Image (tube, grey):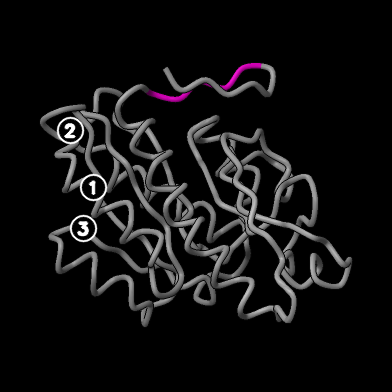
Amino acid sequence: MNNIVILISGGGSNMAAIVKHAEKADWAKRFGARVTAVVSNKADAQGLVFARQHHLATAVLDHKAYPSREAFDVALMAEIDRLGGAGSATGQPALVVLAGFMRILGPAVVDAFPGRIINTHPALLPLFPGAHAVRDALVAGAFETGSTVHVVDAGVDTGPVIVQEAVAVLPGDDEASLHERIKVVERRLLAEVVTRIAKHGLTVHDRKVTIA
């Protein structure tokens, strides 16, 4: 069984899109894959409610409770292994999905799950990396921006791209309106990508991504 662990920090709309796809397509029966757990760094993350309603294991690791970023990363790695390893062929999750997880993973976490962590970004990378991508696109006067699903590496928004889709910047757009349209695309793209990975697997070699 190929296990998938999803990390969230808030409402969990991206996570919910993935779980709904998994249930609709019956991943366990068709692909031998399943979402096993949802982990949050915030106890009040609303996405945890959805996860529990859908009978997923959940865990909260409050990053503020740890003395350092490194200590939090060690605890996070252990929790991902614990929740994602049960029943898997390797004892580790096949995939870790950052679905609105508002923490930068340290190198130890990335190295522990090489080529098996994916994330979304609200821009067409390598354009507008960082925490203010939507605002930066508007300030730059871009005619379009979009959503990227990429593999996480040791940098910030520098990992190999899996898929991208453009979103037009409309006259009168502000950060909130533009970001809302990007989120619609983001949820669909992420759910589609995770479904493909659940079915075919993910390989990263020389920064080239293969889902087959």
Q: Quadrant of residue 169?
A: bottom right
> Residue 54: x and y, percent?
15, 62
> Residue 180: x and y, percent?
54, 72
Amino acid type assigned to the residue bearing label 3 in the image: Ala
> Residue 140: x and y, percent?
89, 66
The residue to which callout 2 is attached is 87
Identify the magenta region: 201-205
Q: Quadrant of residue 16?
A: bottom left
Which of pointers 1 and 2 indicates the residue nearer the eye? 1
Assess whether mark 1 and mark 3 are in contact (beta carbons under 8 angstroms).
yes
Amino acid type assigned to the residue bearing label 1 in the image: Thr
Q: Is 130 left, or right, of 90 in this rendering?
A: right
Badge 1: residue crowd in 10 Å (few <14, some 14–19, many ≥20): many
Q: Which label belongs to residue 184?
A: none
Mark 1 falls on what kind of element? strand
Image quarter where the N terminus lies is top left
Q: Quadrant of residue 201?
A: top left
Residue 39 vertical position relative to residue 151 in the rendered view, above or below: below
Assess whether mark 3 and mark 2 are in contact (beta carbons under 8 angstroms).
no
Image quarter where the C terminus lies is top left
Chain-order first, disc 1 or disc 2: 1
What residue sits 10% from the left and 31% below the top?
29
Whether residue 203 appears in magenta in the rendering, the answer is yes
**Structural distance between the alpha carbons of marks 3 and 1:** 6 Å
Q: Main secondary structure of the magenta part?
A: strand
The residue to which callout 3 is attached is 57
Badge 2: residue crowd in 10 Å (few <14, some 14–19, many ≥20): some
The residue to which callout 1 is attached is 36
Whether residue 122 appears in magenta in the rendering, the answer is no
